[in-house]
Image: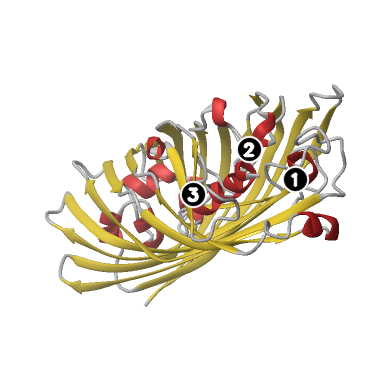
Amino acid sequence: MTTRFFQSAAVFSALAVASQGSGFSLFQGDSTGMADAAGSIAKGGRAGDMYYNPAQLSSVTGTVVQAGSFFTRPHLKIETTDPYTGRTQKTAADKKWFAIPHAYFSTPLCQDVQFGFGVFSRMGLGDEFPRDWPGRYNSTKVDFSTIDLSPAVSWRVTDWLSIGGGLTFQYFDITLEQEIDAAGIAGMRRYNDPAAGPRLDVHQRIHGEDDCAVGWDVGVKVDPTDKLHFGLAYHSPVSVKAKGHASYDAPAAVRAAYPMFFRYTKARGNIKEPDYLMGAVAYDFTDALTLGVNVTRSGWSSWDKLEIVEDEPFLPGHGVLGAEKDWDDVWRFSVGGSYRVDENWSVLASFTWDDSPINRSHADYIVPADTREIYAVGLAWTSGAWTVDATYFFEKINDMSVSARPAEGIWSGRYCDGFSHAFAFSVGYNF
């Protein structure tokens, strides 16, 4: 029972996502950034580029308002093999659309100094499985969202050099649900036997939130020639102090047998989100064609161990719970570019390879994903003071084998058939 509680608390403490990035990171700051991250980091031109590199505010002229949203619908199946019966089956996560909005404002403070403010999300997760599926003793539902508020300033030091920096104030809300095998705990049947049926399962719900977590960003933009553009940005780790509670829905028979267990209890935990180092180069091969390369390092080694403290332990002697994760730092590579068809229309496209930080020895059903391949194409339209951007991308999630850990509700099998369709749009106006 303690292990089951911790698996839920792990997500509550760690801020998990339905994401298009390593672990549960989001790299979709706006529509053009989805289609051409290298251009957003190195060359700029949109207010939303501050999501990637705050120095790119210097590439924005005048006062600009930009807003839009990112929509994704992940598809994923988990294959499990029952260790007691040998039965193998695939279970699909419920197919749902997730919306992740964004908004940006940029205005000059004085000559060569530009102020920007962004509202967006750098992390998120969402998946849901049937409450009677074989992996229910590890996870049945994750619903996690963040809101990041980011003021930033850039300074054009010379015609070819700009620097920028800002702060990020993050708020989050997360809910995780799973089942607890009460009959198995009592020795009435094999513990966490997925074939035993859910009749005596206890439904657990963890809810967590944070008042505010703070991070910071710095960046530099270098244009050594009219055609060559470099960008480098660093986004600091964010230390989250999460507070929440656990509640339980137990069958009457379980309540009667264990009246002192499965009661409402408060919990708290700390987690250090990863830092990000983003670098890109873009080159204008012609007046119409720009191509670029982007490399991003995500510091997921910060997630090595989770520790949750219960204010009122629901089991004596188990007020502090922990588990190893040992995730790795990973790299994300993308190549892409833009082509201006005429004075109003541009086409953007990119390919991204995004490595997974998950340590297979500690893989679970909370973040069931491996390395991703992302193909994106977008359109940008500009007319007078208006800009409209739209992007579609297809994400393929590679299969990953998982070894059995019955005590944690994990069975031999694999994450498989994973992919995602995503759309984004942004609308901007220059006053």
On residue 93, which mark appears?
1
| Residue at the image position 87 percent from the left and 49 percent from the top | 199
- Amino acid of disc 3: Ala
Residue 403 position within the rendered picture, expressed as x and y whole percent measured from the top left: 65, 23
18 sits left or right of 163 in the view: right
> Would you say residue 188 is visible in this rendering?
yes
Sequence-earlier tag: 1 or 2: 1
On residue 14, which mark appears?
3
> Would you say residue 426 is visible in this rendering?
no
Q: Secondary structure at mark 3?
A: helix
Mark 1–mark 3 Cα distance, whole angstroms, equals: 21 Å
Sequence-earlier tag: 2 or 3: 3
Q: Are marks 1 and 2 in contact (CB under 8 Å)?
A: yes
- Amino acid of disc 1: Ala
Residue 227 position within the rendered picture, expressed as x and y whole percent measured from the top left: 27, 41
Q: Residues within 10 Å of mark 1 (few under 14, many from 20)?
A: some
**91 or 61, nearer to the observer:** 91
Mark 2–mark 3 Cα distance, whole angstroms, equals: 15 Å
- Amino acid of disc 2: Pro
When the figure is inspected, residue 355 is found, relative to residue 162, above or below; the finding is above
Query: In the rendered image, which quarter contains the C terminus?
Result: bottom left
**377 or 244, nearer to the observer:** 244
Q: Secondary structure at mark 1?
A: loop
355 sits left or right of 78 in the view: left
When the figure is inspected, residue 60 is found, relative to residue 234, above or below; the finding is below
* Residue wearing tag 2: 368
Query: In the rendered image, which quarter contains the N terminus?
Result: top right
Mark 1–mark 2 Cα distance, whole angstroms, equals: 10 Å
